[in-house]
Amino acid sequence: MNHTSKRMLRLKEELPFHLLLLPGVVFIAIYHYGPLAGLAMAFQKFQPIAGFFHSKWVGMKNFEYIFNLPDFSQVFWNTLEIALLKIVFGLAVPLLLALLLNEATKSWFVRSVQTSVFLPFFLSWTILGGVLFELFSFKGPINALFAWLGLNPVLFMGDAGWFRAILVGSDVWKGMGYNMIIFLAAIAGINQNLYEAAQVDGAGRWKQAIHVTLPGMAPMIILISTLSIGGILNAGFEQVLVLYNPTVYSSADVIDTFVYRLGLFDQQYSPAAAIGLFKSVISLFLVSLSYYLAYRFSKYRIF
Amino acid sequence: MPFRRMAFSRQLFIVINSIVLASLFVLGLLPFIHLLSVSLSSNIAALSNQVKLWPVGFTLEAYRFLGQKPEFLDSLVVSLQRVVLGTAINMALVVMAAYPLSKEVERFRLRTVYVWFFAVTMFLGGGLIPTYIVVKETGIMDSIWALILPGALSVWHMVMLLNFFRSVPRDLEEAAIVDGAGQLKILARIYLPISLPAIATILLFTLVGHWNSWFDGILYMNSPSHYPLQSYLYTLVTKINIEAISTEDLGTLNRLSEKTLRSAQIFLGALPIMVVYPFLQRYFIKGITVGSVKE
């Protein structure tokens, strides 16, 4: 068999693979690479009628414009603060829960708690938002509880300070089941001999938790914290969009919601895209860093 | 060790721990029980905040009324269309893309190129505004396709499935090749049946993802009659927001009387998830645990 016909044979063998991949490639090309290329509009004065190809190029003008927007720095710091709070509490609370749950012995009890804690993870923020508004409304159950405790009623959703606490708290509520299960799996993977050795040394349950369980979970804790570095500019767009209102912008407006209003309500497409690009560049750097660190520390790989 | 023979401090801890965890269990369920109770109560009871965890003046009025509420029914239809059509397309594309990429590079020379092509999108995206413009330019605005095509292939799900495909023994495939089976036949007769657990998991996530999505509906649909259920619920919930930030009952009785109705709609929006929840939980926990034991 000569060289060309061998090549033809291989091509024929591989042809089905290319065909199977074709639809996926087309949609990814249009709806992922298309917008990526469209980021060029951050350097244009984009006009919908002119499109990407005929809008005027303006260099760095949009970036000068957005960095001088009075709200921009506030939105940036809000994002960082909210995201950091969510990361810290989103790790600490499930960690504590997993440790407590590990001490419970009845499996039906463990399963029931898990079921209840994990449910909000699968519900959308519109549903959870509806529930939260009801709970925290001025005449709602939480204020009834406050009254019972002799406290003054609070306008939770209209108060910048309380609102941020609700953002962080409800995010922990939605996500804690997930991290808790990861932590429980990590605990289950700890070598049982270590516990026996600790018992021989006279360690009680408390000492075992501190000296065996926690160190055993350390790799997982480190892995999850490193991976969350990449999300530091994602403060939870959908959640904020459902819950916030203009009276709490000062503490709750984040980059994504700001971009949404600037781009789609004020129709300032190019400045909004410029903020998006700014955010993407920082995020890409952070995500790469976090994956690099995760690989260094825990040999973590996606593929 | 039996409870009675334990040290007192240990007994105390177990009791307190059980109480903490049990209250957590209850606290997690209360909001949803409350929601259901409000939706099953009479308007007056709901308005005057009498309803706690059991319906007051039990009535199915709200649900009966929803059966004739066009906004609700329209959005439900859009959601069902989206879930069925979207899930079918997602699943087809995920399987079709994962299969070739599960082959070794010796069998499929351009594999690496394709893998990179897809992997890049996991870390880089155009973001909200350029995506919106592209959707607009491709002419699918205000149609159901705007909710389906931009996310037609989930790269994360593809990676999950291709990793699963890779664990399928090569011998099976080679035997089929000897018998003269083509690639499609091998995929359909060997890979798919073996991978049913993985496919079921991805199917479930895709269903839930489509049911829960609401922002794309708000973004791409011009008329609210094209909103899927969760987007419609968003408009409903933001209305409650306006009430939640006012100290007075500023609404007329007319508006407030929608309270039971709203609760009913929110509850119905959560219901399908609660129905598949036992399966979700099982698959999800398995997925997470397998992932973490792997290293």
Image: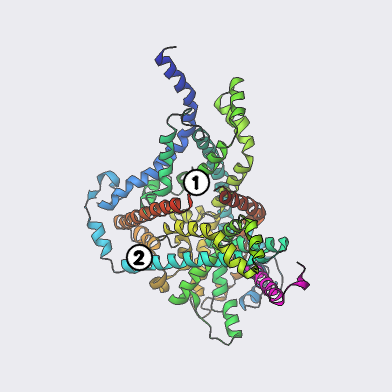
Residue B294 in the image: x percent, y percent?
A: 56, 47
- Would you place residue A130 above or below residue B47 in this image? above
Task: Give the camera-side residue of B288 and B216.
Answer: B288
Mark on residue A294? none
Task: Give the camera-side residue of B231 and A124.
Answer: A124
Residue A128 in the image: x percent, y percent?
A: 56, 64
Task: Give the camera-side residue of A187 and A64.
Answer: A187
Instruction: Determine crowd level at label 1: few under 14, some 14-19, many 20+ residues with C-alpha closer than 10 A.
Output: some
Image quarter in which the N terminus of chain B is found: bottom right
Residue B139 visible at all? no
Q: What residue lies at 47% left-to-right and 25% top-to-bottom?
A: A15
Residue A125 in the image: x percent, y percent?
A: 52, 61
Residue at the extreme front: A201
Residue that mark 2 sits on: A76
State the SS at label 2.
helix
Asked if residue A171 is among those painted magenta in the image, a careful observer would answer no
Q: What residue lies at 58% left-to-right and 88% top-to-bottom?
A: A150
Chain part drawn in magenta: B1-30
Q: Are marks 2 and 1 in contact (CB under 8 Å)?
A: no
What type is the residue that disc 2 sits on?
Phe
What type is the residue that disc 1 sits on?
Trp
Residue that mark 1 sits on: B156
State the SS at label 1.
helix
Give residue B117's quadrant in the image: top left
- Would you place residue A297 above or below residue A149 in this image? above
- Would you place residue B174 above or below residue B146 in this image? above
Residue A13 visible at all? yes
**In the image, are marks 2 and 1 on the same chain?**
no
